[in-house]
């Protein structure tokens, strides 16, 4: 149950609170003003003014402009207070160079949208996405002005998504879109419709009569928004009942499973003898360590496993650094695999030295081989644990919970689409909780709970074992105690600090000290091997420009570097 709770907390934190990686440059775009001057030729001269507030060092800003199909961007320039700035273009991204540190700067951009105005038989329209969902920056205050080539009447101005309900037509026929705060990753197309006579020098985009179609498109969008609001209100009303039902279901599952676990634990505790003894090994010691602590570091598990080979007589020691193979016909598959790896792959078939491990890992081509052998060895240990059937399968029940949890996925998506983000977040949390429950719900059998409780109590009370109890332990039991404690605790700290094992006359201290020294040496070398072979991933990011998500495949965004 601990694993389940930890997993739920981790998944909740990862998916809900982990924020996306920030760019190296820390900035805020305080203000954006865009002026689009429509020309009689159908081209559009654009002037943009961006005010950036930088908190650290910076080299400049970026502006991505993805033109609509049938249009092109030309004559891009940048300046600050009238002074031109260097510009580099890569695909649809423009880099404007302007170094500084902790400054507020205002950069002015200028460019021409070729064929930016669509001209038809009865109307002309400027329908453009100055940003789209690929934009990675927040605009704290954005205003877009559209200026016709001459005074105009009967003007229709309309905004979509972030630009919705922000349009206002001025007395001279211009249009102002006061978007204000604009989140990153959003679309916001603007549409301004004029009489076609204003663009007499522009080529016809199409000979169609488009006024009615454009007005119908706007009416359809209004109808869709109204329907959207109706669905949103309805969903908001029923959400507490649906989400609450799933929440109650998860709470009930947790309550029942915890209660069953506690009842089993109490039953096991009644069966366990109060006298502290070395628990009986119902499976190999590495499997016991893995079963009672699945998160045991590889180096500690390798150390305890090698010491077990020594204890069981398959391997003997020549010194702290050298091991001699005595018998490769072992009781468990993972013991045979460990011997094969250490003595045959790394050693010479008869001996294994830690110096040979170091030499083996000096060749980087062996790192993957090392990791594969270790993972296969750990898998064999898992298979031994699995063969003991220490947990109840409950496959049917777990699959039912998993399938029920999947119902929350479309529900969360539906909430997100309708901007009910609180209910979306709660649905995601419940989905992760139910999914984690279905994965990690493995109730122990009576035998499994008995093994777990015996070894957990032994590990907990390890440094409080009374001397009269130690006198009853054989040398073999003493070594098992050392090996288990070393595998369960960070580099055997409990053993080195425990005078019972280092000075008690009732114990075979020479044997114990030999194992302590071997454990310390082995763990050091296996820990170094883990560090050396740790996978390192060098990732490099590149910016690719694709089709924008705004109208006509256009779009854009802003950034800094």
Image: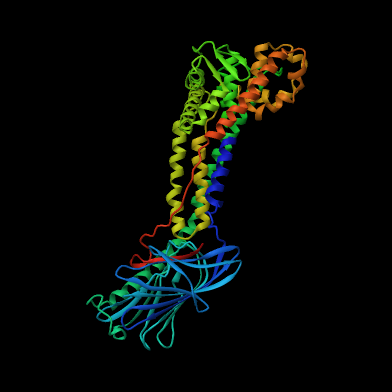
Left or right of residue 395: residue 326: right
Horizontal and vertical percent position of residue 273? 68, 17
| Residue 530 against residue 124 in the figure, above or below | above
On the image, the x and y values in percent for residue 266 come to: 65, 26
Out of 546 and 150, give the one closest to the viewer: 546
Residue 119: x %, y % from top left: 28, 78
Pick the residue in front: 4 or 232: 4
Which residue, as the protein is rendered here, is positioned at the far left? 207
The number of numbered discs placed on residues in the rendered structure image is 0
For the N terminus, give its image quadrant: top right
User: Which quarter of the figure has residue 163?
Assistant: bottom left
Q: Is residue 292 visible?
A: no
Kindly identify the residue that appears in the image at 36 percent across and 88 percent down. Answer: 150
Work out whether 504 lies above or below 544. Answer: above
| Above or below for 374 versus 254 | above
Describe the colour scheme in one phrase. rainbow
In percent of width and height, residue 301 lies at 58, 26
Report the residue at 36% width, 78% height from top.
44
Foreground: 118 or 502?
502
Q: Is residue 30 visible?
A: yes
Which of the 4 image quadrants contains residue 176?
A: bottom left
């Amino acid at each position: 149950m601990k694993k389940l709770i930890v997993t739920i907390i981790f998944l909740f934190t990862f998916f809900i609170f982990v924020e996306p990686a920030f760019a190296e440059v820390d900035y805020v775009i305080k203000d954006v003003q865009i002026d689009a001057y429509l020309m009689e030729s159908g081209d559009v001269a654009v002037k943009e003014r961006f005010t950036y507030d930088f908190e650290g060092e910076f080299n400049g800003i970026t502006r991505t402009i993805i033109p609509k199909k049938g249009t092109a961007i030309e004559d891009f320039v940048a300046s600050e207070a009238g002074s031109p700035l260097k510009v580099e273009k890569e695909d649809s991204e423009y880099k404007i160079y302007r170094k500084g540190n902790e400054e507020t700067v205002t950069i002015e951009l200028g460019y021409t949208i070729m064929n930016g105005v669509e001209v038809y038989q009865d109307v002309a329209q400027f329908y453009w996405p100055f940003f789209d969902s690929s934009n990675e920056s927040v605009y704290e205050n954005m205003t877009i002005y559209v200026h016709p080539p001459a005074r105009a009447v009967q003007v229709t101005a309309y905004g979509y998504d972030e630009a919705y309900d922000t349009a206002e037509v001025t007395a001279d026929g211009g249009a102002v879109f006061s978007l204000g705060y604009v989140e990153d990753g959003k679309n916001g197309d603007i549409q301004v419709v004029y009489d076609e006579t204003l663009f007499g020098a522009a080529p016809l985009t199409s000979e169609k009569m488009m006024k009615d179609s454009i007005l119908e498109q706007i009416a359809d969008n209004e109808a869709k928004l109204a329907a959207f609001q109706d669905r949103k209100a309805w969903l908001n009303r029923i959400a507490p009942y649906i989400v609450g039902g799933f929440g109650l279901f998860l709470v009930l599952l947790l309550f029942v499973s915890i209660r069953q676990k506690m009842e089993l634990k109490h039953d096991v505790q009644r069966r366990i003898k109060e006298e502290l003894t070395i628990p009986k090994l119902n499976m190999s010691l590495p499997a016991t360590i893995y079963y009672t602590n699945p998160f045991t570091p590889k180096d500690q598990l390798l150390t305890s496993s090698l010491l077990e080979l020594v204890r069981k007589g398959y391997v003997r020691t020549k010194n702290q650094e050298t091991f001699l193979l005595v018998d490769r016909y072992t009781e468990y598959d993972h013991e045979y695999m460990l011997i094969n790896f250490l003595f045959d792959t790394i050693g010479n078939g008869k001996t294994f030295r830690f110096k040979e491990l170091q030499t083996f890992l000096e060749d980087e081509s062996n790192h993957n081989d090392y990791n594969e052998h270790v993972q296969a060895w750990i898998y064999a240990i898992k298979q031994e644990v699995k063969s003991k059937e220490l947990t109840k399968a409950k496959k049917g029940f777990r699959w039912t919970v998993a399938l029920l949890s999947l119902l929350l996925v479309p529900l969360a998506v539906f909430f997100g689409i309708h901007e009910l983000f609180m209910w979306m977040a709660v649905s995601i949390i419940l989905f992760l909780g139910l999914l984690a429950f279905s994965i990690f719900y493995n109730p122990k059998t009576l035998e499994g709970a008995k093994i777990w409780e015996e070894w957990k109590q032994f590990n907990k009370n390890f440094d409080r074992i009374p001397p009269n109890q130690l006198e009853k332990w054989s040398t073999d039991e003493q070594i098992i105690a050392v090996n288990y404690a070393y595998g369960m605790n960070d580099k055997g700290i409990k053993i080195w600090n425990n005078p019972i094992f280092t000075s008690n006359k009732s114990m075979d201290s020479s044997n114990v000290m030999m194992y302590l020294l071997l454990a310390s040496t082995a763990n050091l070398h296996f820990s170094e091997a883990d560090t050396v072979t740790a996978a390192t991933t060098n990732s490099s990011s590149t910016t690719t420009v694709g089709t924008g998500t705004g109208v006509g495949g256009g779009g854009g965004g802003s950034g800094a570097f």
